Amino acid sequence: MKPTKSAPSNSSHGGSLPPLWGRARHLIGWQGMTLCVPTDWNPGKVAGNREKGDVRVDDPDGARIEIRWETPKNEVNIEKTVDNFISSLAKDAKKQKRPFESRGDLNLVSKHKKGKKRLVSFGWTSDTSGAAPCGYGVAWSCEHCKRVVVAHLLGQNHEAPRRVERVAQEILQSLDCDGHGGWDTWSAFELQLDIPEEFPIARSQMLVSKLDLEWVRPKPIGLYGWGRRAERIRVQRFPVANVLLEGKPLDEWADWNIAFKNKGLSLSRRDDETMELNGHECLVYRGPVRDPRARLSILFFDLILRRRTPQTRVLVWQCEESNRIFAFESEMSAVNEHIPGDVLASFDCH
Ligand SMILES: [Zn+2]
Ligand SMILES: [Zn+2]
């Protein structure tokens, strides 16, 4: 099993007190970025891709931290980027006739600890008449993933800047922009799993009623890609399983909601196949693509290239502990058939 990043426990070691005043934390993972935040903070907005994008993490009262990244072609002057950012904030404050003070003396995140040669901490304070009374952040350029990362944490009007600064230090210290061994940890709303970097995210629906995430690796170019489809991993999570099922068995629910409603695949339940996951018994669905031309093309090229394209598989299980239903869909080429198992090994449903 691959090493999985997880939120550090709140237990104290060697007599030191737990950080963040003992608030429970969890991991947020998105596009190779990971950070530890209080458990009621989750992504409020996500945009872009691994090369350029951003994620905003909100708490129940509003925006808390925004992380932006970009992969510039040429070297970027981090100090100047931060100066420009602070200047634009100062200008906005002036327009609103609010006080503004930049904090140039901050050292929120240690360059040495982060392993980033070019790293700048920043901070500012204002009054409580605007959206935020203060903000603290860090910017760096990463030699490993080649990205420039800027993270900015905002205080709320009921919080003292001194306290926000400490919280920012804790959270920004935990921020990391590199996956591990070609894998990224994706984590939000208590769903955490590892996905190979080569599978960009293609769908990210995060609703109260349903979580639906899909990662798609485009089909290879040239002979190897003939008649192939893109490789995919898709996870769906449905809350309040007991209400959804209304006392009916899971297979009845899944036949309709997972198999019948799947637009791309013609799925049927394989009652002869059993699989156990995290202590839950899974329903196994398999089936070819619905589009007859695509199906024919796969058959044809499998035959002439003497290869075998594994059938798409969907696992469905009910997690009694979390009262949720999960569906895990995977479509892989034969050489990558181990990937769904590796992903599932990193996946904890409860
Ligand atoms: Zn990086
Ligand atoms: Zn479970």
Image: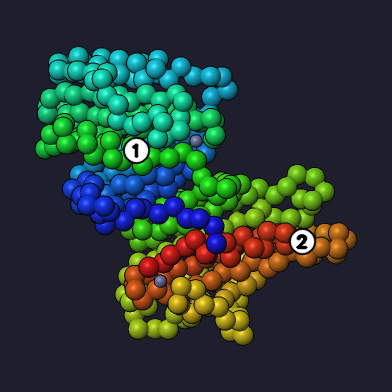
Q: Secondary structure at mark 2?
A: helix
Q: Amino acid at mark 1?
A: Gln
> As drawn, is 152 to the left or to the right of 50?
left
Mark closer to the chain start, 1 or 2: 1
191 vs 49: above or below: below
Q: Residue 26's x, y, as percent? A: 33, 53
> In the rendered view of the protein, which quadrant contains the N terminus?
bottom right
Counting other residues with Cα less than 10 Å from the Cα at mark 1, is it few (<14), some (14-19), or many (20 or more)? some
Which residue, given by chain and number where applicable, does mark 1 sit on?
173
Q: Residue 226's x, y, as percent? A: 79, 52
At x 30% / y 26%, what residue is drawn? 107
Q: Are marks 1 and 2 in contact (CB under 8 Å)?
A: no
182 vs 319: above or below: above
Number of disc labels: 2
At x 38% / y 40%, what residue is drawn? 175
87 vs 236: above or below: above
Give the quarter of the image for residue 262: bottom right
Name the image colouring: rainbow
Q: Amino acid at mark 2?
A: Ile
Q: Nearer the viewer, mark 1 or mark 2?
A: 1
Q: Residue 161's x, y, as percent? A: 16, 31
Residue lying at the far right in this picture: please name it.
Answer: 304
> As drawn, is 257 to the left or to the right of 39?
right
Which residue, given by chain and number where applicable, does mark 2 sit on?
298
Q: CA distance from mark 1 to mark 2?
A: 48 Å
At x 61% / y 60%, what residue is drawn? 339
> In the rendered view of the protein, which quadrant contains the C terminus?
bottom left
Give the quarter of the image for residue 269: bottom right
Q: Secondary structure at mark 1?
A: helix
Q: Residue 21's x, y, as percent? A: 18, 48
> As drawn, is 268 to the left or to the right of 155?
right
Confirm if mark 2 falls within 8 A of ligand 2.
Answer: no
